[in-house]
Amino acid sequence: PPPTPALAVLSGDNRGLLRLGRLKRGETAVVRRITGRAEDVHRLEEFGLCHGTTVEMFRPGNPCILRLAGGKVCLRASHALEILVAPA
């Protein structure tokens, strides 16, 4: 499929949410939904990436680097895991 524009807003139950990977350097957002295998979601929660967490895109790309809660987390894109955020 063609790439989604950076500010693309999802439809349906995800209205107003963006895919985390669409954030640009320095943009902040609040995590609203994480879907995927339970063990993958749990691992992200252990790093502090969970519903309601404010994140800043430190370095976009694959892998991307997020700033959250005073630290940084590096994430590689995965088709099995989706992180949706609301612009802050």
Image (cartoon, helix red, strand yellow):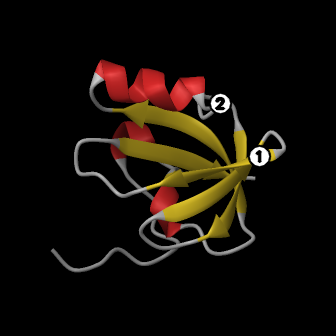
Q: Nearer the viewer, mark 1 or mark 2?
A: 1
Residue lying at 40% horizontally and 57% vertically, measured from the top left: 76
- Alpha carbons under labels 1 and 2: distance apart: 9 Å
Q: Tell me if 13 is positioned left or right of 66 in this view.
A: left
The residue carrying pointer 2 sits among few (fewer than 14), some (14 to 19) or many (20 or more) residues within 10 Å by Cα, namely: some
Q: Is residue 54 above or below residue 27?
A: above
Q: Are marks 1 and 2 in contact (CB under 8 Å)?
A: yes
From the viewer's side, name the closer residue of 55 and 63.
63
* Residue 26, horizontal then vertical, whole percent: 75, 71
* Residue 38, horizontal then vertical, whole percent: 32, 19
Q: Amino acid at mark 1?
A: Gly
Residue beneath disc 1: 71
Residue lying at 27% horizontally and 26% vertically, measured from the top left: 37
Q: Is residue 8 above or below residue 76?
A: below
Rendered-image quadrant of the N terminus: bottom left
**Disc nearer the start of the sequence (1/2):** 2
Q: Tell me if 60 is positioned left or right of 78 in this view.
A: right
Q: Is residue 14 above or below residue 9?
A: above
The residue carrying pointer 1 sits among few (fewer than 14), some (14 to 19) or many (20 or more) residues within 10 Å by Cα, namely: few
From the viewer's side, name the closer residue of 29 and 37.
37
Label 1 element class: strand
Residue lying at 48% horizontally and 34% vertically, measured from the top left: 33
**Camera sees residue 51:** yes
Residue lying at 36% horizontally and 44% vertically, measured from the top left: 82
Q: Amino acid at mark 2?
A: Gly
Residue beneath disc 2: 48
From the viewer's side, name the closer residue of 73 and 21.
73
Q: Tell me if 77 is positioned left or right of 80 in this view.
A: right
